[in-house]
Image (cartoon, rainbow, N blue to C red):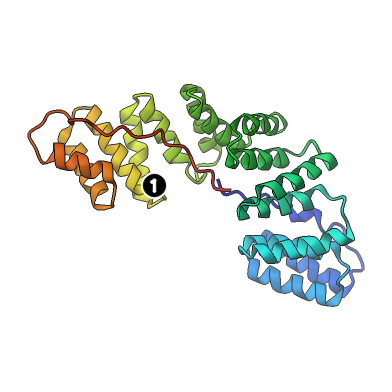
Amino acid sequence: MHRSLLLPCSMLVLGLQAQTPGEAELALALAAYEQGTYDKARQHADSALALNDTLYGAWKLRGDIRQRLQDLDGALDDYGRAMKLRDDDARLFVSRGAARITMGNLKGAMKDLDRALELDPDDSDIWYNRACANYMGQDVDRAMKDAQRALKLRPEFPEALFLSGVVKGERYREEAGIAEIEEALRLRPDIPGGTMSLAMLYYETGRYTEAIDLYTRVIDSGADGETEAYYYRGDCHYNLEDKEKACADWRISDAKGERDAAFIVRNYCDTDEDKIPKKPVRKRRNTVIRF
């Protein structure tokens, strides 16, 4: 699940009075960052550092800007420069840990997040980021514990609810997983992969009509997983004994390269069979958390 947990930048520059030129540029960079105009924010951050390269907030902010712009190596460089000026800011370690998670450096990310927790154990974002790192490292027990710590600190934390629901679903606690993912999507409907994950749990619990609605939403949105959505929507129709609709979806899935769909089309859809002979047994689909 991609979620960039960077410092709420309003904390970087507070109550600036009689600003120096560098601080004035930093304030402009902050304003642009908060508006989501990252290229403009980068320009002002560059100017701030050109005027005063000892501004901790400018190095930290430019690192966050670079992370938003997917310049992760550049972000790490800026976080390193910021750390030389100040190494007691938990959110600096959160930001660097987030970049390292995105880069796949889970060991480095955990080191940063552990340091962040030493500095601020009550920050829910840190626990959530650690849950993501543990999940990506296939340590689902620790991922669940960290997600629960995040939720204890912030009960309405949609991404943590989603991750917790995903883990519960994978542990065959489908109904509990469904409840948490439904709540997560109520709080944040655009969680990456959220609709598909909920559809899969509906499918696995035999709630085929509800699953069909969600697979259709995935297909209509053009989101990742479209080929799988056609396959599983077809299987829902099949379980509801509607061969025509099932085969319509399986033919599309086949055309998109789905091998199990190709087998079904060949041995069921193109025949007079009422049931699929030797229906392919698919492995349980695990959610890919996009951080």
Is residue 181 toward the left or the right of residue 239 in the image? right
Q: 140 or 182: which is nearer to us?
A: 140
Q: Position of residue 162 (x, y in %)?
A: 55, 36
**Among the 4 quarters of the image, the one containing residue 261:** top left
Residue 8 in the figure: left or right of residue 180: right
Of residues 249 and 155, the one nearer the viewer is 249
Q: Is residue 153 above or below residue 67?
A: above
Residue drawn at 63 percent across, 34 percent down? 143
How crowded is the residue under tag 1: few (<14 C-alpha within 10 Å), some, or many (20+)? some
Instruction: Label 1: state its secondary structure.
Output: loop
Q: Which quadrant of the view contains residue 124?
A: top right
Quadrant of the frame with the N terminus? top right
The percent coordinates of residue 200 (x first, y second) are: 40, 34
Residue furthest right as drawn: 18
User: In this orientation, does residue 30 appear?
Assistant: no
Q: Mark 1 is on which residue type?
A: Gly
Q: Residue at x 49, y 32 (%)?
A: 182
The residue where tag 1 is placed is 225
Q: Residue 279 appears at what percent x and percent y?
A: 23, 32
Q: Which residue is at the front of the view, 47 or 201?
A: 201
Residue under the point 71% across and 74% down: 43
Residue 197 percent across, percent down from the top left = 45, 37
